[in-house]
Image: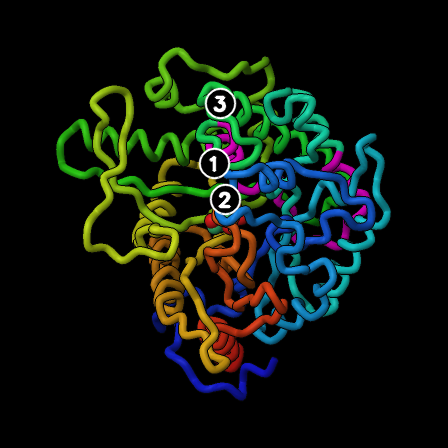
Amino acid sequence: MDLARQAPVEGLAPDADSGFWRRDFLLGAATAAYQIEGAVHEDGRIPSIWDSFSHTPGKVLNADTGDVACDHYHRWEADFELLSELGVDAYRLSIAWPRVMDEKGRPNPKGLDFYKRLLDRLAGKGLQRFVTLYHWDLPQYIEDRGGWLNRDCAYRFAEYAELMSRELGGRVTAWTTLNEPWCSAALGYGLGMHAPGKRDWHLALQAMHHLLMGHGLAIQAMRPHDPAAKYGIVANVGRGTPNSDSPADRRAAELFEAQHNAWVLDPLLKARYPEALAELLPGARPLVLEGDLATIATPMDYLGINYYFRTNVESDGAHGFREVPLPDVERTQMGWEVHPDGLRDLLIGFARDYANLPPIYITENGMASDDKVVDGVVDDAQRIRFLRRHFNAVSAAMKAGVDVRGYFVWSLMDNFEWAYGYERRFGLFHVDYATQTRTAKNSAKALKAFIAERRERS
Ligand code: IFM
């Protein structure tokens, strides 16, 4: 696909003094295994909780599943040409745990070879490789033993992580242990919107604790085998703003951010859970054994931040908050408010609140729109504006002193958007799922143009 020959489009170049122009500021695109790979029964892959969940009636919009997805398992070579076409510096992908280990915990050579081929090709293209170990596809047999509610899961995860560092060490620029533990715990165990579909906030607290334990144990197990790589975790963060100036609403916004951000970041960076959790869920505490918090706070080389929207909240009159959607604000296909300042404010706040905040990569940011191919063109002007405004918001945080090293667009291409199936389109490239045709959206062309201009200037 030759983007250069296509019509010029509105640019997404950030402000002239933005750190995004620096050649050493990493620009990339991201995906995750279950959302793109398909081939769920091939080469020894075993079932995951998302296979079970997506095949359960009523769990995913339009009964979509990841069985085929973008068929990336068979089309990865052509998909990597899209990365070259964009000219990005880096690619963020995830490894499917169920593809690389069998039910007895033994390595699956065919699955491992798949990721070796991918990583070697990316390295050959000169791209940095950001590799996530857990982007939600827990092997179903581990779920059958209690999943993340069972402390043993953290140790099984560390075994898997160690195996990956032995097998793939030297091929990876940066390892990410977990993608968005908040989503795994809150959506998977608190709200039931994601696999494994449980609805009990007490369970969510315990699942989070074991997820974070798995993270710390994994870094400890991996570093000796792949000492040159960087190690970190990816947290999705939420901006909460008060609906009024009243003390109750201001406290509600604080509680919202504690529940979304500090629940994950405090144990990682302060070796303790925030007091606010007890205020939100009186009497509920995870079972924490001696030494657990030190394990969770194992030093990291970077922190990945995923940001999408802001939530306006008021006090619920009891222990928490409830959302008050703002009228007349710009929203995306997900219904999420477009609010770039929220990202700037959160980054500045994290740098203030965490003395040991490691360097940051924005590991996901992007938006869904109901994109259509018309005469070969996908006019996604809203995404171009969205990206430019978020580039500028991140730059503003950098100017305020926050150490941000890179930014990944979510996502390289349209894919399986979890409980929303294929209806919600986040990609820079449009995917026609019937034919598996990829079409560059105007945002892809605009990103390519910015990257080319940046290269010329440096
Ligand atoms: O598609 C997801 C991704 O898997 C995790 N972060 C949020 C994205 C958009 O919802």
Measured as percent of width and height from the top left, residue 119 is found at 73, 58
Location of mark 2 (residue):
419
Measured as percent of width and height from the top left, residue 235 is found at 49, 41
Magenta residue span: 160-189
Estimate the spatial distance between the alpha carbons at disc 1 and disc 2, rounded to whole Å: 7 Å
Q: Is residue 1 above or below residue 149?
A: below
Q: Is residue 438 above or below residue 206?
A: below
| Residue 175 lies in the magenta stretch | yes
Badge 2 amino acid: Ala
* Of residues 17 and 362, the one drawn nearer to the viewer in this rendering: 362
Quarter of image, res 279: top left
Q: Left of 342 or right of it: where is 314?
A: left
Residue plotted at (48% across, 31% down): 192
Q: Secondary structure at mark 1?
A: loop
Badge 3 amino acid: Leu
* Of residues 152 and 329, the one drawn nearer to the viewer in this rendering: 329
| Tag shown at residue 193 | 1
Q: Find out if the beta carbon at label 1 lies less than 8 Å from the nearest ligand 1 atom.
A: no
Looking at the rendering, in which quadrant would you find the N terminus?
A: bottom right
- How crowded pointer 2 is (Cα within 10 Å; few <14, some 14-19, many 20+) is rated as many
